[in-house]
Image (cartoon, grey):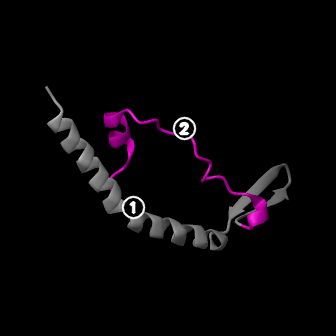
């Protein structure tokens, strides 16, 4: 899979600054924290995130060739209408 950056820039599409997907909420059980003296130690438990990773993998498989086909269509359209 190719990163979206060049595609977004080439077509002038808006690019999100931060979508918040990387944020972990303690209530999900993916992050735990303990206080040790004057430090707070955070630990990441990847098990609750496994469902999200599986979902993301399915989305990637579904959209990969569709996004590439859309990009090719747009490039072909640009070539047809140049000049």
Quadrant in the picture for residue 6: top left
Instruction: Give the camera-side residue of 26 and 83.
Output: 83
Q: Main secondary structure of the magenta part?
A: loop
12 vs 78, left or right, is: right
Farthest front residue in view: 81
Which mark is drawn over residue 63? 1
Circle 2 is placed at which residue position?
Answer: 17
Lateral position of residue 70 relative to residue 46, left or right:
left
Q: Count neighbours of disc 1 (C-alpha within 10 A) and say few if under 14, some if 14 to 19, many if 20 or more.
A: few
**Front position among marks 2 and 1:** 1
Q: Residue at x 42, y 63 (%)?
A: 60
Say whether disc 2 or disc 1 marks the residue closer to the N-terminus.
2
Q: Is residue 8 left or right of residue 75?
A: right
Instruction: Say what secondary structure mark 1 lies in.
Output: helix
Q: Residue at x 66, y 71 (%)?
A: 48
Asked if residue 48 is positioned above or below residue 12 in the image, the reply reads below
Q: Residue 24's x, y, as percent?
A: 68, 57
Name the residue nearer the viewer: 41 or 10.
Answer: 10
Q: Which one is nearer the viewer's eye here, 77 or 69?
A: 77
**Residue sitting at x 70%, y 65%:** 30
Residue 45 drawn at (x, y percent)? 67, 69
Q: Position of residue 65 (x, y in %)?
A: 31, 61
């Amino acid at each position: 899979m190719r990163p979206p950056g060049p595609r977004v820039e080439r077509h002038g599409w808006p690019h999100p600054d931060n979508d918040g997907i990387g944020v972990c909420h303690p209530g999900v059980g993916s992050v735990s924290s303990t206080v040790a003296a004057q430090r707070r130690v955070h630990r990441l438990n990847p098990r609750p995130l496994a469902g999200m990773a599986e979902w993301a993998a399915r989305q990637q498989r579904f959209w990969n060739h569709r996004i590439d086909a859309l990009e090719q269509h747009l490039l072909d359209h640009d070539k047809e209408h140049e000049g």
